[in-house]
């Protein structure tokens, strides 16, 4: 019994009736079937059957019984497939980035210093020579082959 205090005095409340607990089932619950499921008959050939194999509730493969021969067929795991594709993409992207970075050319201008009188001196570069190529060669950025 529970006592509730209110301004008029002590009041008692009877307990709330609860439904009766269900009787225990006399038949025991089926045991875990294990990693190998029941034999499934396949339509078509009368001597064909399929036995699924699971690990922690996930299908990992199946035994296929056809014509007196037993074969195990692995199920493709989509999580592994996505992980492999992501890894391959990451390796390809990293390789492409390294290749692009390694093809960068160093700057064409060497050390720039101020000479006497305020003119610029570019050290480490040859003197410019006039371009005698035709206009179409300059447009295509074509250079003559070295003579040997």
Image (cartoon, rainbow, N blue to C red):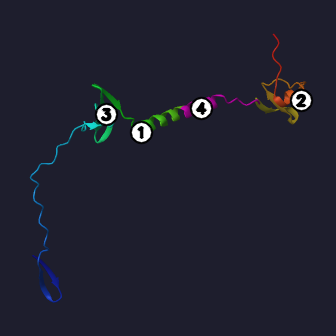
Residue at mark 3 to residue at mark 1: CA–CA distance: 16 Å
x then y, percent, for residue 87: 48, 34
Is 34 placed left or right of 3 in the picture?
right
Q: Which mark is residue 96?
A: 4
Badge 2: residue crowd in 10 Å (few <14, some 14–19, many ≥20): few
> Magenta span covers which residues?
92-109
x then y, percent, for residue 141: 81, 28
Residue 123 or residue 82, whichever sits in front: 82
* Magenta run includes residue 97: yes
Question: Which picture quadrant has residue 22?
Answer: bottom left
Residue 118 or residue 95, whichever sits in front: 95
Q: Earlier in the sequence, mark 4 or mark 2?
A: 4
Q: Earlier in the sequence, mark 2 or mark 1?
A: 1
Mark 3 element type: strand
Residue at label 3?
Answer: 62
Q: Nearer the viewer, mark 2 or mark 1?
A: 1
Q: Nearer the viewer, mark 3 or mark 4?
A: 3
């Amino acid at each position: 019994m529970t006592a509730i205090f209110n301004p008029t005095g002590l009041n008692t409340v009877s307990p709330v009736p609860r439904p009766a607990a269900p009787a225990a089932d006399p038949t025991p619950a089926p045991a875990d079937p294990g990693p190998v499921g029941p034999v499934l008959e396949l339509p078509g050939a009368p001597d064909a059957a399929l036995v699924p194999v699971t690990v922690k509730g996930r299908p990992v493969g199946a035994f296929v019984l056809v014509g007196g021969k037993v074969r195990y067929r692995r199920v493709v795991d989509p999580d592994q497939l996505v992980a492999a594709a992501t890894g391959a993409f990451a390796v390809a992207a990293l390789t492409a980035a390294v290749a692009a970075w390694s093809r960068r050319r160093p700057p064409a201008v060497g050390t720039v210093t101020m000479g006497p009188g305020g003119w610029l001196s570019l050290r480490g570069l040859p003197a410019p020579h006039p371009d005698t190529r035709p206009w179409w060669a300059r447009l295509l950025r074509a250079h003559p082959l070295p003579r040997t």
